[in-house]
Image: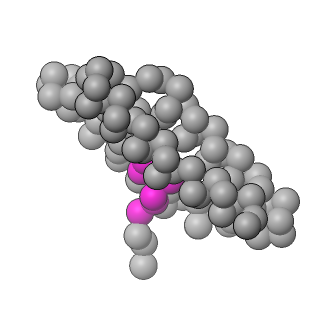
Amino acid sequence: MTLPTMLIATLPALLIAAALFDLATYTIPNTLPAGMLLLFGIFLVAMALGGHALHWREVSPHLLAGGFGLAAGLAMFAAAWSGRGDAELFAFAGLWLGWAVR
């Protein structure tokens, strides 16, 4: 199993951990969204070192989705519909999942 594949496999684990923390304590520790951001950066570096560097047009939809996730999450936080951890989680999950651009 390659490093990028292992990094991609950690995303569901981090999302499940965030869901369990949220269900149990109504909080999402900052380490989980921060871990998602850090792992995305490591993923990009691992892809580049493996000879499969992602071009800007491949990375930009991920940044777009992360930005929209952050904007939506902060809007819901401002309206008191969700917490700040949820806003962070929306942003970094969007960063990983990207935006389907065709």
In this view, the residue farthest toward the bottom is 102
Residue in the image at 29% along x and 20% along y: 25
* Residue in the foreground of this view, choosing between 17 and 8: 17
Question: In the image, is 4 to the left or to the right of 29?
Answer: right
Question: In the image, is 66 to the left or to the right of 45?
Answer: left
Residue 3 placement: quadrant: bottom right
Which colouring convention does the figure follow? one colour
Which corner quadrant holds the N terminus?
bottom right
Determine whether 9 is above or below 71 in the image: below
Q: Is residue 96 magenta?
A: yes
Question: In the image, is 88 to the left or to the right of 86?
Answer: right
Residue in the image at 59% along x and 66% along y: 58
Residue 6 placement: quadrant: bottom right
Position in image of residue 76 (x %, y %): 20, 32
Residue in the image at 45% along x and 58% along y: 97
Which corner quadrant holds the C terminus?
bottom left
Determine whether 37 is above or below 50 in the image: above
Residue in the image at 61% along x and 48% along y: 40
* Residue in the foreground of this view, choosing between 5 and 23: 23
Position in image of residue 30 (x %, y %): 48, 23
Residue 8 placement: quadrant: bottom right
Determine whether 69 is above or below 61 in the image: above
Residue 64 showing in the rendered view: no
Q: Is residue 87 magenta?
A: no
Residue 40 showing in the rendered view: yes
Q: Which residues are magenta?
A: 92-99
Position in image of residue 85 (x %, y %): 36, 27
Predominant secondary structure, magenta span: helix
* Residue in the foreground of this view, choosing between 87 and 8: 8
Position in image of residue 55 (x %, y %): 68, 66
